[in-house]
Image (cartoon, helix red, strand yellow):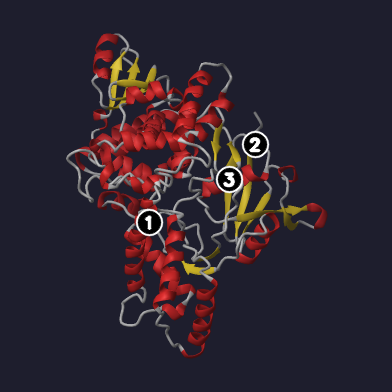
Amino acid sequence: MSSPVNLRIVFGGDEDARKLALKTGIPKSVDELVLEIMTVFGVKQKFRLQYKDKDFGNEYMNLTSTTQIEDRDTLKVIFLSTDDFNSCMHETAPDVPSCSSILVPLHKTTCSSDSPNTRHASPCEFDSVSEVYLSEDSFSSSTETVLIKSPESRTSSWPQVFVIPRFSCSAEIQLQRADTEFNKSEMLLIPPPKLRSDILEGMAEEIFRYAAYPTDSQLDQAAEALINVHPCLREKGTRTGHEGWKHYLKIKMANFRSKLSKIGHPEITVNSLRNKREGRGKAASNIKKPKKAEVNFLPCLPRGETADSMEKERIALLTEVKKNNNEAVIKEKMHLTFSYRRQELVEDLPMVSDLQSRWPALFTVNEINAEFMRITTVPLLSKFFAQLDKYSADLQKVFSGKGGASGQKISRIMTVADKCGDIHIKRDCVIQSLCVYFNEDMTTVVKEFEDSNPKEAEARISETTLGLFVIRKEGAGAEEEPSDVGVVIEGVTLLENLKSISFGLVILFGLIYALNLSYPQCLKFTFEFFQKVLMNLDGSKLSPKVQALKIKMFQ
């Protein structure tokens, strides 16, 4: 393993510089380094990197190879404007249409102060299939391998800045003239039906790139972006100037889904009346849609593939799993069968025991991490633990102000963390304190047993619906590492020999996404904190209890 290195990452001007610690050394490629920066700092906009070249008096030059940098070097992040990005796109894909550029103020949130208030963005994205190897760190003994792109899958979650697409030629000409007139005389445009239809059609297609069932806030963001790019479309007599467009978009998305349902798009047809279970034959009953910020909730099968061909791949995968040192082939086939597996999970709701026999490769740490990435486009293990370690000090500051019986219990838990130097034990204590802070009982999900009574442990584990089991040596305290930690769902032990309780909870969190399960009600606020604060998935909409904690963390 390479020795750890530290890099200074500059965003914009030198006043915004941050430290990037790479525990396994400098990545082998610029793409891997870019992904690491995007993951650690939560950057979603496209950018390039520049380094200080000693041959040119430490002037910034574009980084083309990681061999050009070393420990303690400074890298500058250059966000790509529309022109830069389009020129880059045209070099690789001449037929890609040009895109409208937009400058929209970002809504400030308490969870991040890293982003500037405004940014240029472009909807164009690279469409090549790429494979990214994430670096090894202290909490994972194996390299996290994630396949990023599939033609039938979404590649990113809802953007911080919604980019308005380019409409039809006729619509663009009319909007350009109307915007020019607005800039001269502030005359607003009352769009004729054909123009409004073209605008809504283009907006619906762009929205569907990110979400089939956009939330109210997402529709509001899209409508606001529309009038910022084309101010001639502002509406008189409304508070925001775009409330009418938001209403139009809501109706258009419903109609757009109806169109997709007729041509058989699985994410829409799964909710058609003919696919409802007996007794649930109402249109609004049991809607199957993303509820935990899933990006690829129910993707289409790969191009040219059918259910029969995918079933053959699944059967072939059963043979590959039995071979030694076959991770690369397994990873490739798991990625290929992702959409087929999701359709089986969402539509058929199989038992976990059946899934374990049909998809044994899924129930490993590496594949759970990869599946989470396929579903959310966010890496699970690296992002979770990086954010937990980042916010541990802020959480402990809030915990110290907790009074009453809960405060005393948290104090006892954190005393163990202060005495112990093991990072796993410290993480366990922080998560356990988080549960106490939310007045949730962690023991309802995490069952602890002593190794002296294995029969009792087996009996209790077989009765567990969803949770962890922790085996400790007889008389061992909380400051000692457990002998074993495992994940149990529907009485089936899915994984064993995990490193710690915190690691087990992250794997359980990943399995909830991979198996399309709901969070346990007894720890719903803790898992909401995992999702929306640590992983920043749908982080703008929090329950009052989690929102209150988040505000206190950043005071």
171 left or right of 445 in image = right
From the image, state whether disc 3 or disc 1 is nearer to you. Answer: 1
| Percent of width and height locating residue 206 | 46, 60
**Residue that label 3 marks:** 35
Question: Does 412 appear above or below 387?
Answer: above
SS at badge 2: loop
Q: Quadrant of residue 16?
A: bottom right
- Rounded to the nearest angstrom, the CA distance separating label 1 from label 2 is 50 Å
- Quickly name the residue at label 1: 259
Mark nearest the camera among 3 and 2 is 3
Residue 253 screen position, x and y as percent = 36, 60
Q: Earlier in the sequence, mark 1 or mark 2?
A: 2
Is residue 418 visible in the rendered structure shown here?
Answer: no
As helix, strand or loop, the secondary structure at mark 1 comes to helix
Quick one: label 3 or label 1, which is nearer the N terminus? 3
Q: Quadrant of the N terminus?
A: top right
Give the residue displayed 43% in from the left and 59% down from the top. 207
Q: Is residue 131 left or right of residue 344?
A: right
| Disc number placed over residue 25 in the picture, else none | 2
Q: Nearer the viewer, residue 123 or 408?
A: 123
Q: Which residue is located at x 36 percent, y 64 percent?
A: 252
Circles 3, 2 touching at the beta carbon (< 8 Å): no
- Determine which quarter of the picture holds residue 360: top left
Q: Amino acid at mark 1?
A: Lys
Report if the CB atoms under discs 3 and 1 are less than 8 Å apart. no
Position of the C terminus by quadrant = bottom left
Characterize the local packing of mark 3: few (<14), some (14-19) or many (20 or more) Cα atoms within 10 angstroms: some
The tag earlier along the polypeptide, 3 or 2, is: 2
